[in-house]
Image: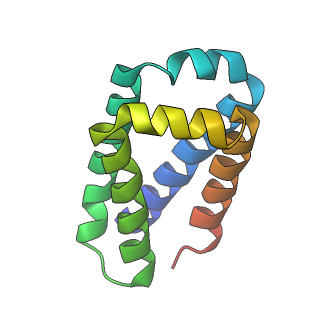
Amino acid sequence: MKENVYIGLVAALLLVSGVWHLVAPGLTERWMTRAAVVRAAGAALLVLAIPTLVWRGWYFRTLFVALVLSGAWRLCFPQSSIRAQQTLYPRWVHGCLLTGAAVAVWALRP
């Protein structure tokens, strides 16, 4: 039961973030170019990864690795994260990636 609630929460957060990137790219760009906001997002991802350590299986280990890598990069190297997202692709692409991740987290759940 706890696992299902957690998975739903992660999927919902990814979906909301992805949709926000798609419908408000200008506002997202303004907020996500601030190092403090990027660091806070990284810290939130790291905190979100903690429950996966309790549960077993490839699904939770994979989710742990993805959340920790993404969170640590944003927390420890916010300027690098900002530059990468500005130069690699536009915000709407990141929105599509986040939305796709939300679908994957939900669809692949154990």
Q: Within the image, what quadrant is residue 103 found in? A: bottom right
Residue 1 can be seen, yes or no: no
> What's the coloring here?
rainbow
Of 55 and 1, the residue lying toward us: 55
| Residue 57 position in % (x across, y down) | 37, 84
Residue 22 can be seen, yes or no: yes
Residue located at (33% from left, 39% from top): 77
Residue located at (37% from left, 67% from top): 65
Query: In the drawing, does residue 23 fall left or right of residue 78?
Result: right
Q: Within the image, what quadrant is residue 27 found in? A: top right
Query: In the drawing, does residue 74 fall left or right of residue 107?
Result: left
Residue located at (67% from left, 31% from top): 21
| Residue 54 position in % (x across, y down) | 23, 71
| Residue 44 position in % (x across, y down) | 33, 39
Residue located at (67% from left, 51% from top): 97
Counting the numbered discs, the total is 0
Compared to residue 88, the image places residue 28 above or below, namely above
Compared to residue 104, the image places residue 34 above or below, namely above
| Residue 95 position in % (x across, y down) | 69, 41
Query: In the rendered image, which quarter contains the N terminus?
Result: bottom left
Q: Within the image, what quadrant is residue 78 found in? A: top left
Compared to residue 107, the image places residue 79 above or below, namely above
Query: In the drawing, does residue 41 fall left or right of residue 18?
Result: left
